[in-house]
């Protein structure tokens, strides 16, 4: 199509006439500070491209100049999402910075004069303030100015997320097609605005149509003469010559199927028509049988500047494969649904049986090991108490000291076993401190040598100037001792045990292999020359209750405790082993950025029981009568006045009265009202009341930092009475708030 040299010259701003919302925004935009300048000063090549874009119902945008200033049409607005309010006249790279690494190679090719096309390109966009996975078909084409140089880039695109995703996404594609129903207006507006470059711009537009993912056809006049069709349309109807032919002559087999009547209706009334999954019979090859296809399509009237209807724009998609697949799927679903339900029931029954068998096996291991350990411990306690009773009855009180020490030792070992049960489930309350592993290992050297015996030598390889780490030193000592005992048992004929420390910096890939965050770590390796482990044993080594020892000779919690402690501390554990060679077990603990302010490994010094200041009142809330009696009697012996309550409700009555209370000591898990809720309610009327929680096991103990508020502390059962006395004295006198105390009982149970 050409333009007569006698046509009137277009007014300077006429190319922005119409164009919907974006045409109006471009006319109203303040261009004074834009690198493009005022539209009246734009070159004709830019005006032509803008006019084609604005009057198209297909999503399009262009960029111009070295800054790649971004201009777009109404159909492109939905693609921008929340960015639409500020996107006009912005630099392209700033607008789509979130996907620039994907787009920039094609953009560079376009500015080098090369047109590109992308189909179903994945773009993770931030157009609505969150990452959104989308797919697009789009082309980038260079725009040349009057000198022939590349001055801009033109893009026509279609979002194909609907065809890549599910039915929901298919509905989005259908909406996108409806939004694109006015694309043919581009050609008519281009005729009015074009100059001598009209033929080149028309060819450019034809290329855009050719590359569109759906079929497109432009029909002119009442006889619906084909003016323009793209490759997708040719593929749909079979490769036959329809150019400049009336539709009824070009596609005679379609007569009587209702499509020509719809074209007549749209041309006559000016009302668009939308069809979904319409069947059409086509003879795609001469002499070939008729073939049924299914199409989604839009018939949209085309009008000239005076509003007269001049043709019909057709756009759509061949959805035959989708319709056939849906039909086949419905048939398969109808026949297989009952079979799937039956197989699912069978699978669920088998899984239930397997889980029950695994649970019973684990319970057997747990009860065998723990019953063995606890029976021994209870025997030590019960036997010692019996001997004490007999000695006292015989007046031989000077002989009961060693039996008291034996009972206390058995109690400590029972507490240690309880801690190990908590550790493998990551419920062990930790007291993390800044620790220097070299000093801790060195301080344990004598203990380790005695533990290993004469047949196993010990070698320390400690890295100088090793970083400090953040962990619970008591748990780390217990872990090292457990690993040393395991290594000793793996070397029945003797051997060598090496403890080696080092510093590691893990990048993202290395950290992923260890299942930790990238960063700096302190590594402690325990290396033995023992019998080694098979790959199957390594696979289950950290499983709770797993042990290679006979039932009744181990709980299977040793390595589980180590694993739970290290993972709870933000680190990782790794086993490397070879049968007949030995085992290397590596503990990775995160580096601490704080200096060691005190010796975390200094031996505990005996403390004198602090006496209470005159008149101090302590309320004890404990539902276990024996524990409550022990604590109350101990507090009275230290000089405190005491009040008692058997549950949270009774305690709350006292706390909400006018009775003076200087310290609340309460169990966490109480009937009626638990200790935490009681303390919170009490602080509403006594905001500065110190609270000391006691617990043997609680979710709060595993997350004490979030559990405790200022003026609160938590101590785990069983605890040493001297440590308990010191804590009571400190809290009554307003010192050391918001902390966690654990039992310091060493873990002397055998490692598994």
Image: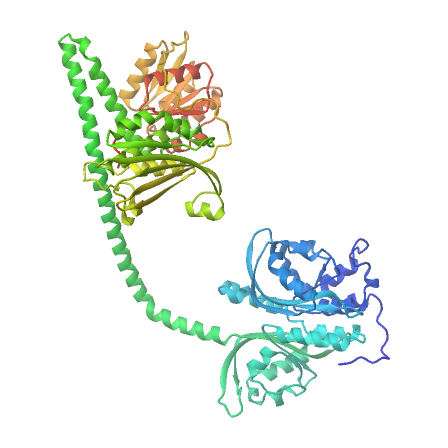
Residue 271 makes an appearance in the image: no
Colour pattern: rainbow
Quarter residue 363 falls in: top left
Query: With 61 as the anchor, is 46 left or right in this view?
Result: right
Up-down: is 58 above or below 444? below
Query: With 488 as the anchor, is 120 left or right in this view?
Result: right
Query: On the rendered image, what quadrant is the N terminus found in?
Result: bottom right
Query: On the rendered image, what quadrant is the C terminus found in?
Result: top left
Residue at (24%, 41%) from the top-left corner?
547
Residue 472 image offset from top left, x and y in percent: 40, 30
Quarter residue 428 falls in: top left
Residue 578 image offset from top left, x and y in percent: 30, 46
Query: With 353 as the anchor, is 215 left or right in this view?
Result: right
Residue 467 makes an appearance in the image: yes
Residue at (38%, 11%) from the top-left corner?
610
Residue at (29%, 41%) from the top-left corner?
544
Q: Which residue is situated farthest in the bottom direction here?
A: 287
Up-down: is 606 above or below 552? above
Quarter residue 11 falls in: bottom right
Residue 134 image offset from top left, x and y in percent: 56, 60
In terms of depth relative to the viewer, which is nearer, 474 or 323?
474
Residue 579 image offset from top left, x and y in percent: 27, 46
Q: How many marks?
A: 0
């Amino acid at each position: 199509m050409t333009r007569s040299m006698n046509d009137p010259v277009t007014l300077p701003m006429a190319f922005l006439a119409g164009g919907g919302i974006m045409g109006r925004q471009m006319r109203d935009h303040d261009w004074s500070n834009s690198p493009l300048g005022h539209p009246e000063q734009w070159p004709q090549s830019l005006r032509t491209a803008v006019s084609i874009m604005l009057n198209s119902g297909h999503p399009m945008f262009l960029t111009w100049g070295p800054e790649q200033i971004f201009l777009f049409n109404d159909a492109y607005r939905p693609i921008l999402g929340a960015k639409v309010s500020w996107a006009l006249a912005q630099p392209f790279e700033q607008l789509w910075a979130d996907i620039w690494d994907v787009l920039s190679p094609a953009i560079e090719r376009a500015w080098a004069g090369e047109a590109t096309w992308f189909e179903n390109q994945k773009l993770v966009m931030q157009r609505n303030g969150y990452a959104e996975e989308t797919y697009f078909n789009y082309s980038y084409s260079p725009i040349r100015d009057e000198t022939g140089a590349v001055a801009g880039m033109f893009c026509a695109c279609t979002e194909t997320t609907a065809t890549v995703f599910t039915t929901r996404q298919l509905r989005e594609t259908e909406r996108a097609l409806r939004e694109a129903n006015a694309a043919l207006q581009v050609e008519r507006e281009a005729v009015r605005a074009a100059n001598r470059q009209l033929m080149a711009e028309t060819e450019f537009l034809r290329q855009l149509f050719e590359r569109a993912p759906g079929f497109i056809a432009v029909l002119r006049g009442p006889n619906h003469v084909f003016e323009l069709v793209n490759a997708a349309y040719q593929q749909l109807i079979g490769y036959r010559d329809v150019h400049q032919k009336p539709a009824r002559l070009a596609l005679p087999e379609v007569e009587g199927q209702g499509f020509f009547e719809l074209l007549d209706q749209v041309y006559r009334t000016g009302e668009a028509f939308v069809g979904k999954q319409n069947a059409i019979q086509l003879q795609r090859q001469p002499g070939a049988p008729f073939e049924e296809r299914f199409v989604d399509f839009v018939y949209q009237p085309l009008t000239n500047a005076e509003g007269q209807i001049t043709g019909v724009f057709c756009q759509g998609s061949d959805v035959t494969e989708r319709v056939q697949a849906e039909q086949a799927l419905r048939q398969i679903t109808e026949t297989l649904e009952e079979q799937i339900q039956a197989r699912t029931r069978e699978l669920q029954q088998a899984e239930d049986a397997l889980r029950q068998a695994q649970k019973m096996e684990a319970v057997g291991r747990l009860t065998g090991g723990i019953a063995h350990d606890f029976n021994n411990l209870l025997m030590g306690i019960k036997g010692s108490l019996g001997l004490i009773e007999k000695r006292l009855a015989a007046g031989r009180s000077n002989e009961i000291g060693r039996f008291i020490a034996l009972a206390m030792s058995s109690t400590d070992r029972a507490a240690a076993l309880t801690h190990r049960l908590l550790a493998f489930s990551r419920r062990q309350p930790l007291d993390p401190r800044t620790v220097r592993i070299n000093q801790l290992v060195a301080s344990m050297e004598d203990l380790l040598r005695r533990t290993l015996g004469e047949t196993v030598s010990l070698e320390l390889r400690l890295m100088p100037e090793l970083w400090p780490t953040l962990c619970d030193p008591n748990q780390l000592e217990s872990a090292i001792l457990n690993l040393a005992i395991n290594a000793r048992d793996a070397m029945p004929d003797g051997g060598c045990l090496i403890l080696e420390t080092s510093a590691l910096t893990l990048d993202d890939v290395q950290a992923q292999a260890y299942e930790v965050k990238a960063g700096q770590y302190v590594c402690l390796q325990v290396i033995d020359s023992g019998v080694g482990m098979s790959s199957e044993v390594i696979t289950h080594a950290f499983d709770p209750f797993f042990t290679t020892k006979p039932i009744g000779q181990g709980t299977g919690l040793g390595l589980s405790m180590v694993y739970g402690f290290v993972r709870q501390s933000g680190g990782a554990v790794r086993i490397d082993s070879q049968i007949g060679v030995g085992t290397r077990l590596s503990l990775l603990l995160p580096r601490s950025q704080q200096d060691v302010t005190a010796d975390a490994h200094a031996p505990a010094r005996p403390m004198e029981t602090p006496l209470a200041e005159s008149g101090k009142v302590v309320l004890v809330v404990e539902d276990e009568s024996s524990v409550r009696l022990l604590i109350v009697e101990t507090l009275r012996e230290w000089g405190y006045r005491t009040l008692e309550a058997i549950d949270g409700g009774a305690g709350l009555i006292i706390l909400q009265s006018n009775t003076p209370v200087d310290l609340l000591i309460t169990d966490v898990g109480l009937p009626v009202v638990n200790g935490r809720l009681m303390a919170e309610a009490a602080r509403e009327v006594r905001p500065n009341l110190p609270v000391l929680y006691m617990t043997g096991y609680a979710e709060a103990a595993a997350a004490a930092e979030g559990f405790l508020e200022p003026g609160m502390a938590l101590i785990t059962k069983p605890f040493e009475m001297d440590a308990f006395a010191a804590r009571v004295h400190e809290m009554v006198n307003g010192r050391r708030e918001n902390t966690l105390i654990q039992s310091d009982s060493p873990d002397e149970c055998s490692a598994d």
